[in-house]
Image: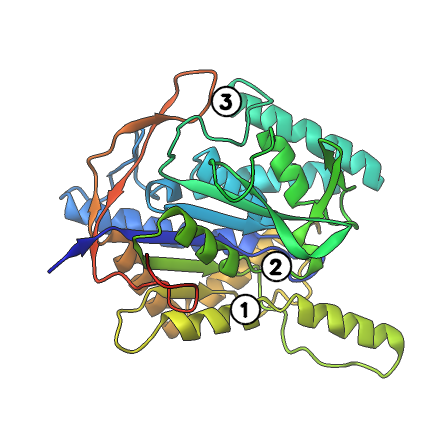
Amino acid sequence: MPTHRGIRVLTLDGENTIHSGVSSALETLRLIMHRVAWKESETIGDRGTFPHSDGSASDDEALPCDYFDIIVGSGDGGWAAIMLGRLRLSVSQTIEAYHKIHSAIHHSKSPLSTIQKSIQFESMLKDFVKKRCKNANELLLDPEAKPKCRVVILAMTPTNMQFPILFRSYRSRQHPLKGCKIWEAIRVSTALPSVHLPYTIEGQMYIAASGAGHCNPIETALKEAKEIFPNDGLFCVISLGSGHPGHITLQGSDLTSIAETTIQLVRDAERVSDNVQSRLNIKEQPRVFFRFNVDQGLQHYVVSSKDGYADAWSHSMSYFQQQQVNMGIDEAVDCLCTHRSLNQQHTNICNDHSQQLGTKQISAQYPVTFKGVGKRS
């Protein structure tokens, strides 16, 4: 039987409402990576201790950058994607940093204006990157020519709201990479008008794609995967939502109600995932597409509220208790753990120092081709 390399893809939705954030998606990912570590530690015969690719060990969770070939995010999901893939943090480290920065901006003693929030946000992002990379202005472009975990974030320009602009951590033939810094990429990805000012790079103004109908980046992720690995098939695709918005209904016949309903329809991330799932999870193939999205309790969730983080955690825990969800997570974990090699080479996380982190080699039998995205090369 022929053996092919199987592509593993992770996507993180942006906000389906203005303030929903990405907390529930990260809680879901944390549970997935915890179960991955548990399963892998059983395989190596030492339950409770799991080796990371940087040589360290964890008794709690595996690193997403060791398991996914490409991580794609929109809105706050883009922020998380950069931390997980480009900075190679654990999910717990990402959640801690995400909540800490959010709290400092939204829970200050005196309310901040949009301008003040944007300035403080940029300063905190620079400080965080500097602690991780020793250089606050570290580039988004990975120092490795072919990084083992690639990152893509979506943004928009006010002059063209139809197609998202992609910021990549790797070189691509599609578009020349701008000299974008890591903190700038996060700033662009999260530039929702009601939260932060638009951000300008090399004379071009950008805003968050999640506020313009591109909450769910799964289609972009599949196209990028095909571009990067034209001769390989999909092996595992995990799509994480930021909380189900509930049923979309027209609340009134006035123009304001119609406009609000139209915005909800444009941001309907579940519709996008349903379309992808119908293409990828075909009967004659093993399941490759996994969609998780907390379905209750987050319709009116506000990440910047005082109790927002605890609420997201509580609703996420209830979601995980559902039998179908729990079984789906186990199935996704089995898929991620299949044919993974711990024979990993080391790579640099930053351009200006020698911090070493590992990469992975994956092989899988019968990968799913890019049906609906384009024929395999």
Mark 1 = which residue? 272
Report the residue at 74% width, 68% height from top: 263
Q: In this view, does 135 lie above or below 149?
A: above
Neighbour tally class for label 2: few under 14, some 14-19, many 20 plus, Cα within 10 Å: many
Residue occupied by mark 2: 215
Q: Position of residue 297 (x, y in %)?
A: 60, 67
Q: What residue type is labelled 1?
A: Val
Instruction: Residue at the far bottom: name it.
Output: 253
Snapshot quadrant of residue 55? top left
Q: Which amino acid type is shown beneath numbered disc 3? A: Cys
Residue at numbered disc 3:
133
Amino acid residing under circle 2: Cys
Q: Which tag, 2 or 3, sits closer to the chain's start?
A: 3
Specify which label sits upstream in the sequence, 3 or 1: 3
Left or right of 371, for residue 113: right
Q: In this view, does 299 lie above or below 179?
A: below
Of labels 2 and 3, the one closer to you: 2
Q: Which residue is drawn at 37% across and 54% down?
A: 32
